[in-house]
Image (cartoon, rainbow, N blue to C red):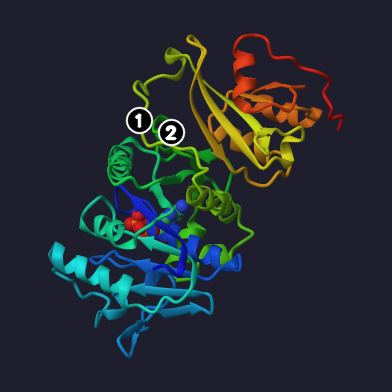
Amino acid sequence: MENITHKFIVLSGKGGVGKSSIAVNLAVWLSMQGKSVGLLDIDIHGPSIPKLLNLEDRKVQIKGKKIKPVLYSDTLKIMSIGFLLQNESDALIWRGPMKHNVIKQFVTDVSWGNLDYLVVDCPPGTGDEPLSIVQLLGKIDGAIIITTPQQLAIVDVKKCLTFCKQLKLPVLGVIENMSGFICPHCNNRIEIFKGDGGKEMARDFNVPFLGSVPIDPALARACDSGKPFIDFDSQNPTAQAIVSAFEPLLVLGKQIQTGTAFYSTSQNKNPANKEKQNKMRIAIPVTASKLSAHFGHCEEFAMVDVDEQTKEISNIVKLQPPGHQPGVLPQWLNEQQADIIIAGGMGQRAQQLFAQNNIKVVIGASDQAPEQLVKAYLNDTLETGDNICDH
Ligand code: ADP
């Protein structure tokens, strides 16, 4: 395991929320970025990775005392209990200690070699398997939690967050899957499951919200045919939504390892209603720890949560923004529930887009640290100069 630089584990509270589909696409996407990647499926009772990658007829080989993982490509190695079963429909009836032993073998006896990333797809819930893998992997960058927006799924996913907290496992972020459906006939968005459960939960638990992925029949078809969407249908808007959710992970993993990530898994006390609590989130584009004059080219966004009444900062999360094509950042900041952006300069069009996304824009701030800017803003002493951006 010491030859593996980054380890991500993918968790969900419930089954059927798209956890394995996202895990597969994450592993394939990382390998498409030129990384060497391993994908470990520890869903002992319902391994779906072989099917999702069209590798159902493949079996592992034993070389010496080592198990050779199945190769999806030169840079993506896969291991799953599915490769050891005689038939796809075989059921394993195993208790905790047996599962722990097989997961241990997957970790210690598989010739993973040098990997940039290991992605582990866990079964849903917080049972024996995720506990075993967290104990066996050693240092883990963190968990990616997949949920769907409806309240029933959210209740269970909160247990995942508590699980992470108890095991001191960093949470890299939450991805809300099956978040609305774009009708192919009228292009209107239909909310199949009401609510913004994933986003709200991420905010309540002070963990990054990585993004939302709509229900897309093309994604379901890709899963059924074992062709990872991200590879075979990369221009599809849903594939692009998946990529924007993955992009921050490259940076978050590094931040966690160097101890520069700012996150916490403690739940805010009264998550009920933002207005009632006077909670506000201020986004500040940052480069080298100070406000970046050109918000589209900043290194990261500091998301500063404040209590409007006490004028206290309650939390700061640093998030890696997606690309800065027109419209992307206002929408992304809206998804991150930003209420205000404090910027150096900003063009007219961007100002309009922020307004459309219900984000107030404060322009002309100088290159100070986010905390200083926010404190000055709250005390009405923020000095603003000219808008240095005129396009
Ligand atoms: P889990 O691992 O959480 O049990 P899966 O990844 O196996 O869930 O997905 C369950 C089913 O939902 C699969 O048939 C998959 O193709 C489908 N699915 C997942 N995400 C989406 C989506 N965004 N749009 C359409 N179908 C999806």
Pointer 1 residue: 267
Q: Secondary structure at mark 2?
A: loop
Label ID, residue 317 = none
* Residue on which the image places disc 2: 206
Q: Is residue 175 visible?
A: no
Horizontal and vertical percent position of residue 3: 45, 70
| CA distance for labels 2 and 1 | 7 Å
* Crowd class of label 2 (few under 14; some 14 to 19; many from 20; radius 10 Å): many
Marks 2 and 1 close (CB-CB < 8 Å): yes
**Image coords of residue 111 (percent x, y):** 39, 79
Q: Is residue 122 above or below residue 251?
A: below
Eyeballing the image, is 247 above or below 201? Answer: below
Q: Secondary structure at mark 1?
A: loop
Front residue of 114/184: it is 114
Q: Quadrant of the C terminus?
A: top right
Image spot of residue 56 (x, y percent): 36, 78
Which residue occupies 81% across, 18% down?
385
Taking the spot 49% from the left edge, 9% from the top edge, the residue there is: 309
Compared to 326, does 246 lie above or below? below
Kind of residue at disc 1: Gln
Taking 56 as reference, is 233 left or right?
right
State which tag comes first along the sequence, 2 or 1. 2
Q: Amino acid at mark 2?
A: Asn
